Structure formats: structure tokens, C-alpha cells
Amino acid sequence: MGTINVLFSGVGGQGIILASKILTQCAFVSGYMVKESELHGMAQRGGSVTSHVRFGEEAYSPLIQKGKADFLIALEELEGLRYADYLKPDGYVILNQKRVMPSALNQDLTPYPEDVKAQLEDMGFHVDAVNAFEIANNLGNPKLDNIIVMGMLSRYLPFTISTWETVIQESVPAKTIELNLSAFKVGRELIKGKA
């Protein structure tokens, strides 16, 4: 297996850093070399947040070059479009169909992009779209969308379910473990036919 590159994008408060730490730990305990780098924009104010995770037999630089990401995990639609140029030509996008209006966007001059999923597919990417916020609300906690998309991502990566579950248990507050594991399972169920 070569190096797998996963880029997370979203806005502050969506749990991007937690999600990338879970992935990093899964790779580490599974015996891979792993590198991670985070970039916080105005994270406290709903600004852009990204995290790069690279793992495999070799992974020396933590940053993913444009055109080299295997996966883009976009927790917000506009952020998915913004970082699409990091994906390799046949890359995969897990797109949370959530819209957070950037404070800098003047809706009259620049409307929020329509049908982001179709735009990403038109660029040649494989897109798994989900309204993770709605699913998270139904589970009883609107802040679970990051764990739902991790469940989706888990279908594509070489880690055992027990590795994912152990790392999640060690990464979230004790009182939320069951809820997070449920969210992870729901995410996995959304992607059928994968390992």
C-alpha cells in the first residue's frame, strides 16, 4: 500500500480536529507511519479549518500537495468546493450537505453555490453525500456529524472496526461514548458494498 492522503475541511466547531486525530490514531495503532497537520483559520468564529492526514509504509511530509489527496472529507459544502483542487483526478469526496454562510460572503453579490455535489461530480470525483447534521439530530446530538462521516470513511480504509471503535472510545468524553459509536455505525451503514 502506498501513502493514503486524507484532507479534512470544514468550519470551526464541526469537530475537524477530533476527526483527524481519530484517523491519525487508527493509522498509528495499525502500524502505519502517519503524519498530521492542522490549519485553524478563524476557527472560533466559524472560519475555515483544515487538517491533512497522510499514512502508509512511508509518510514524511504532513502536508498534502494539490492534486494528491485520495479523500476529501468536507464537513461543509463551500469548504468542499474550496479544497477540491487538492484531490487527485479520481479522488473521493465525503460531503456533508451542510451550509454555513461565511461572514465574508455578501449574499446579494455572491450567492451560496447551488448543488455542490453535482459540481464536484462534474469535476470527475466520486461523491458520497450525506446530511449528517440531520442524522446527528435524530440520534440526539447535533455535534455528531464528524463521527458520522468518519463511519463513512471507514468503509474505504484498511483499519478493523475494533480499531475504529477503540480509538473513538479513547477520544471522546466518557458520557458520549455510546452515542459516538452509534453515529459511527450509522455512517458505516450509509456506504454499502465496501469492505
Image (spheres, rainbow, N blue to C red):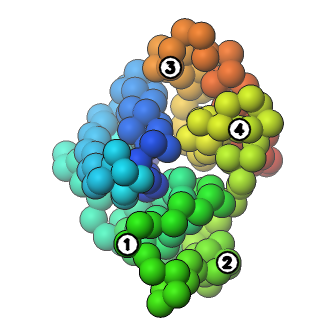
Q: CA distance from mark 2 to mark 4?
A: 22 Å
* 154 left or right of 19 in image: right
Q: Considering depth in this image, is 136 or 1 the residue closer to the camera? A: 136
Question: Which residue occupies the extreme bottom position in the image?
Answer: 109
Earlier-in-chain disc, 4 versus 3:
4
Q: Give the residue at x 39% y 32%.
A: 21
| Position above or below: 177 against 191 | above
Q: Give the residue at x 59% y 36%.
A: 143
* 59 left or right of 28 in image: left
> In the image, which is nearer the foreground, mark 1 or mark 2?
1
Image disc number at residue 104:
1
Q: Considering depth in this image, is 134 or 187 the residue closer to the camera? A: 134
Whether residue 51 can be seen here: no
In the structure shown, which secondary structural element does the residue marked by tag 4 occupy?
A: helix
Q: Residues within 10 Å of mark 3 (few under 14, many from 20)?
A: some
| Position above or below: 37 against 173 | below
Q: Position of residue 44 (x, y in %)?
A: 34, 45
In the structure shown, which secondary structural element does the residue marked by tag 2 occupy?
A: loop
Image quadrant of residue 153? top right
Image disc number at residue 172:
3
Earlier-in-chain disc, 4 versus 1:
1
Q: Residues within 10 Å of mark 1 (few under 14, many from 20)?
A: few
Residue to which mark 2 is pinned: 115
Q: CA distance from mark 4 to mark 1?
A: 28 Å
User: Disc 3 marks which amino acid?
Assistant: Val
Q: Position of residue 142 (x, y in %)?
A: 65, 37
